[in-house]
Amino acid sequence: MSDKSVEARPLPAVPFLKIPAEGSPYLEALKCGACGALYLAERVACGKCAARGGFSPTRLANRGTLYSYSIVCRSFPGIEVPYVSAIVDLEGGGTVKGNLIGVAPEPAKLSFGMPVEVVFKDALGRKDREGHSYLSYFFQPRA
């Protein structure tokens, strides 16, 4: 593999987004071996059962339901508004926050419990200092 092909691969926008050399990107949580609670960040102890250690990487599902949302109308300069900030309960466990795309940011177009799927796209054109692009995850309504 040449250096050019390595540079062409995008970087994950968050640590729990995994981009394998072969196959599709996915979200990964750490699962408590004692109680099964899922976490997106490194942990020393489980916040649910207080067990220490014993966490194992677990691939999260790409399907879920909209648990909650907020339509954001004011943001930092350079961030296009309005957009939908969503919290999604994934099938098989795990709750993840992200942006909901592919639907108008209007309450009449959104409903709690609506089926959504995780999609992976360029992170809105963001790049690091060396010019590497980022890959991020978004939610979109399921067809």
Image: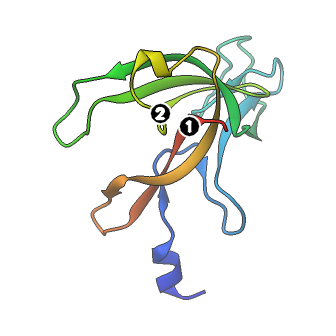
In this view, the residue in front, 108 or 96, is 108
Q: Which residue is mark 1?
A: 140
Hey, which quadrant is residue 107 in on the image? Answer: top left
Residue at screen point 80% across, 22% down? 36
- Where is residue 53 drawn, in percent x and y? 73, 29
Residue named by callout 2: 103
- Give the amino acid at mark 1: Gln
- Percent across and percent down for residue 55 are 75, 32
Contact between labelled residues 2 and 1, with CB atoms less than 8 Å apart: yes
**In-image side of 23 versus 16 (left or right):** right
Residue 105 picture location, percent across and down? 39, 26
Query: What scheme was used to colour the molecule?
Result: rainbow
Residue at 64% across, 55% down:
25
Image: 117 above or below 9: above
The quarter of the rendered structure image containing the C terminus is top right
Front residue (pair 31, 126): 126
Considering the numbered disc 1 on the image, is that residue within a helix, a strand or a loop?
strand
Q: Secondary structure at mark 2?
A: loop
Lateral position of residue 26 relative to residue 58, left or right: left
Task: Say if 101 sits above or below 47 in the image.
Answer: below
* Residue at the outermost bottom position: 2
Horizontal side, residue 126 vs residue 40: left or right: left
